[in-house]
Image (cartoon, rainbow, N blue to C red):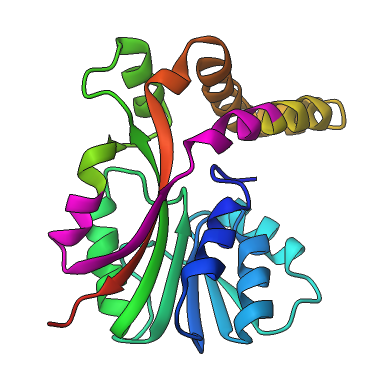
Amino acid sequence: MLPGLDKQIEFLHKHLDTTPSKVLVCGPESAAAAVKIRNVSKADVNIIVEDFDSLINTNLKLEGEPGIKSSLMEYSMTDFDDKNFDLIYAQASITNPNRNKIIKEFKRLLKPGGRICVGELVLLEKKTPRYIDNLFEYSQMQPLFVDELEKFYLERGFKIMVSKNLSSTLREYYIIISSELENSIKLLSEEEISYYKKLISKINHESNVYLHQNGEKYYGFKTLLLKRNDG
C-alpha cells in the first residue's frame, strides 16, 4: 500500500513510450509495482530499500518471482554503474530532505534518454498550520509545493513528459492502511507491537491528520513521467 495506490503504475504503463530492458524500483512496499513492470516489459528489475526490515518484507513478497532482485542501498549512493537503467520508478519514497542527492544519483544511473516515473507528496498551500509541519517533521518528509515540483525536476536536467495529480487517491489510501493496521495489531504479540511501535504511531498519526484534521486541504500526491534531457 502506497500513496497513489495502483494509479501511478497505471499512469506509467499508459504513457511510457519505450520498452525498458533494465529497471530500478526504489522504496519499501514496491514489490507489487516491480512485478507489474516486469510482467509488462519483461525487463530485469532491481528493487532497492534503505532498511533491513523492508528488505526482508520485500524478499517475502517476491518469493517465486523470477527476474527481480532486491538489495539494501541508500537511494542517494547506490552500487550500480553509470548509465545502467532505462527506467527508474519511485512511488512515495523520495519526498525527503535528501531529495537533491537522490535525484542526482538517479540521473547518474539513467541511460541517455532514460525515464523516471516519480510520485511525491506535495503541499497544496504555501502556508501550512503547525500540526501539518509537525506531521512531516515526524515522518521525515519534505514535500515541495505542488506548483514547484515540476520546476525542481526541470532545473535538474529532466524533461516533463506528462504529469497527473493523484491527490484523490489519498483518502482511500489512508482508510485502507488504517483498517489493515487495526487488523494486523490484533495478530501481533506485545513484543512485536513494541518493536513496531514507531511505525504504528507514524501510520496512525498520518491517517488521523489526513482523515480527521483536514489534512486533505494541505497536502496531496502528484506523479510525473520524466525523461533525462541530454540536449
Asked if residue 96 lies left or right of residue 61, the reply is left
Q: Nearer the viewer, residue 162 or 30?
A: 162
Query: Which quarter of the picture shows residue 56?
Result: bottom right
The structure residue drawn at horizontal position 69% and vertical position 56%, both measured from the top left corner, is: 57
Query: Which quarter of the picture shows residue 123?
Result: top left
User: Considering only vertical position in the picture, is 90 above or below 88?
Assistant: above
The structure residue drawn at horizontal position 42% and vertical position 50%, both measured from the top left corner, is: 164
Query: Which quarter of the picture shows residue 107?
Result: bottom left
Number of dots carrying numbers: 0
Residue 59 x/y as whole percent: 70, 66
| Quadrant of the snapshot with the C terminus | bottom left
| Quadrant of the snapshot with the N terminus | top right
Asked if residue 59 lies left or right of residue 8, the reply is right
The structure residue drawn at horizontal position 34% and vertical position 80%, both measured from the top left corner, is: 114
Tell me which segment is drawn in magenta: 150-175
Residue 135 x/y as whole percent: 41, 22
Q: Would you say residue 161 sits in the magenta stretch? A: yes
Residue 221 in view in this figure: yes
Asked if residue 217 lies left or right of residue 4, the reply is left
Q: Would you say residue 108 sits in the magenta stretch? A: no
Asked if residue 91 lies left or right of residue 67, the reply is left
Q: Residue furthest right?
A: 187
